[in-house]
Amino acid sequence: MLQTGLTFGVASAIPQTTSGTAAQSSPNLEKYVQPLPIPEVRDPDGKRRGADTYEIPITEFTQNLHPDLPDTTLWGFDGVYPGPLIEARRNQRMMVRFDNSQLPTDHLFEVDERIGGTTAENHPGYDKAVPVPEVRTVTHFHGLKIAPENDGQSDMWTSPSGVVGPRFTNEWQELPMRQSD
């Protein structure tokens, strides 16, 4: 499955409730009470320059991850966890566009600006008059041979309101699928 497919997982799993500074211990949960979720294969949405295209929304949704826990707020691909499976064939290129416009513009947690990448000063070439949005996404592919401009690096992000990172170049990520066996 890994040789022929590409899975898109959850962008981030965010618990619905948080406490400010107190460390929380993990609840004692019964293991293996739910079947392992198997991602569904996602069909292409169309064609672009001869390649199958996938327009994948990144959304916020809630899902129950264990029967003894309340629903959890997640940010993920196609509104499901785990995200969909895209089957690919070697040397048959595809194009993927991730749309995060449905995400909130305010993060669920307080953003710690002491962490690199959270302020305009952390991004050479970025307009320092424009604040770095709290919510921004970029998708990076592991294990594929892809040109750097198509392989989501940390400063190639987009925000739900359309603000882009300093090295964002492509709305569509082109995946040539040329990795070896």
Image: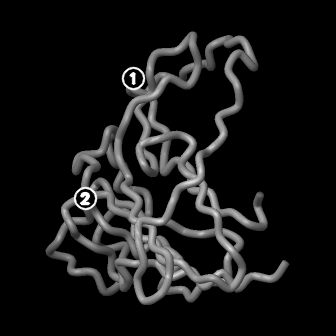
Question: Which numbered disc covers residue 17?
Answer: 1
Look at 39% across and 65% down and name the residue there.
55
**Residue 114: quarter of image:** bottom left
110 relative to 120, above or below: above
Q: Position of residue 11 (x, y in %)?
A: 48, 51
Horizontal side of 96 relative to 41 (left or right) equals: left
Circle 1 — which element? Answer: loop
Q: How many other residues sit within 10 Å of disc 2, few (<14), some (14-19) or many (≥20)?
A: many
Q: Amino acid at mark 1?
A: Thr
Task: Check the picture and name the quadrant holding the N terminus.
Answer: bottom right
| Residue found at the far right of this picture | 181
Q: Residue at x 26, y 65 (%)?
A: 132
Q: Residue at x 19, y 62 (%)?
A: 161
Residue corresponding to mark 2? 160
Question: Which structural element holds mark 2?
Answer: loop
Name the residue nearer the viewer: 149 or 94: 94
- Assess disc 1: are there few (<14), some (14-19) or many (≥20) residues with their C-alpha within 10 Å of its C-alpha: few
Q: Amino acid at mark 2?
A: Pro
